[in-house]
Amino acid sequence: MTNAGWLDSAAASGVRRSLVEEFSSIHVYHLKGNARTSGEQRRKEKDNVFGVGSRAPIAITILVKNPEATEQGQIYFATVDDYLTREQKLQQLRDIGSVLSSQAQLTRITQDAHDDWLNQRRDDFSNFITVEGKKQDGLAIFANYSRGNETGRDSWMYNASKAALAANMSRCITFYNEQVALAKSQGTDFDLDNDPTKIKWDRDRKQSVVKFITSPIFDITKVVLSLYRPFVKEWLYSDRFWIHVSGKCLNCSHLRGRRT
């Protein structure tokens, strides 16, 4: 007689599998009484056969090893009726006399591939179309996807307002080119200006400024529509000089900022 939680717990699938492998037959009589349920299920569980001494469901389990058995791991299951009090459950056990008797009315259970005995799961989910098709040849919702454009400075390069984006990037590019000019004139005395209101630096731009590489001037034709994180339509300044990592392009140039 044990806690019956192992009968349907996902964490106890290994226990159920081991019992099937180890014993020729397994006879379980479930006495219910799980006080951790609620609502209608709690009313069905009703009293525990140990009274207030236990809040866990209780099961009587008989494990049989028969070296002459023609089948291994036969599972037989029965349960007391719903809504029974402690006394009614005990009386039902007395009336049965033995879990192995015909009065117990045990039902043969066949475990599934997941080692489930009760509440066996359906495999419908495995037949659904997969979301990610990059690593398999079957039907998929997204056959092509990438990280999209990792700008390293989203607050500068994305904006719902085309005019605001143009103003931000014009100011950023102008400031960057001023820093390149200072680096040329000051040499080893050059000190990078890290003012976050003027620019957002990344590794590539920090390296390019000390190599005296200027940025192309702002080009309004590089402002394109983009899907941002991932369902908000925003404008993107799609210039490879300013995009830190550019993901796979999806077919057309106007989708270069798209994130899938």
Image: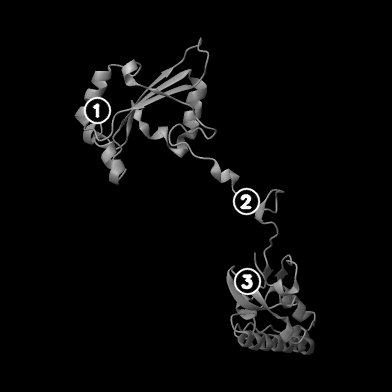
Residue 29: x %, y % from top left: 35, 25
In the rendered structure, which amino acid carries the disc numbered 1?
Lys
Please tell me the numbered disc located at residue 227. 3
Q: Residue 83's x, y, as percent?
A: 25, 35
- In the rendered structure, find residue 130 and report the number of the disc placed on it: 2
Residue under the image location 75 percent in, 81 percent down? 209
Considering only vertical position in the picture, is 233 above or below 20? below
Q: Residue at x 68, y 83 (%)?
A: 192
Q: Residue at x 25, y 24 (%)?
A: 92
**Secondary-structure class at tag 1:** helix
In the rendering, at what x and y percent does residue 251 appear? 75, 67
* In the depicted structure, whether residue 74 falls above or below residue 49: above
Tell me the number on the disc at residue 19: none
Distance Cα–Cα, label 1 vs label 2: 48 Å
Residue most extreme to the left: 87
Query: How many marks overall?
Result: 3
Report, in whole angstroms, how far the alpha carbon at label 3 lies from the one at label 1. Answer: 62 Å
Specify the quadrant of the image occupied by residue 228: bottom right
Q: Are marks 3 and 1 in contact (CB under 8 Å)?
A: no
Label 2 – label 3 distance at C-alpha = 22 Å
Res 89 label: 1
34 left or right of 150? left
- For marks 2 and 3, the one nearer the N-term is 2
Indicate which disc, 3 or 1, sits on the residue closer to the N terminus: 1
Label 2: how many Cα within 10 Å (few below 14, some 14–19, many 20+): some
Q: Which amino acid type corresponds to the residue marked 3 in the rendered image?
A: Leu
Q: Mark 2: which secondary structure?
A: strand
- Mark 2 residue type: Thr
The colouring scheme, among rainbow, by chain, secondary structure or one colour, is one colour
**In the image: residue 253, left or right of residue 161:** right
Quadrant including the N terminus: top left
How far across and how far down the image is residue 16, in percent?
A: 47, 29
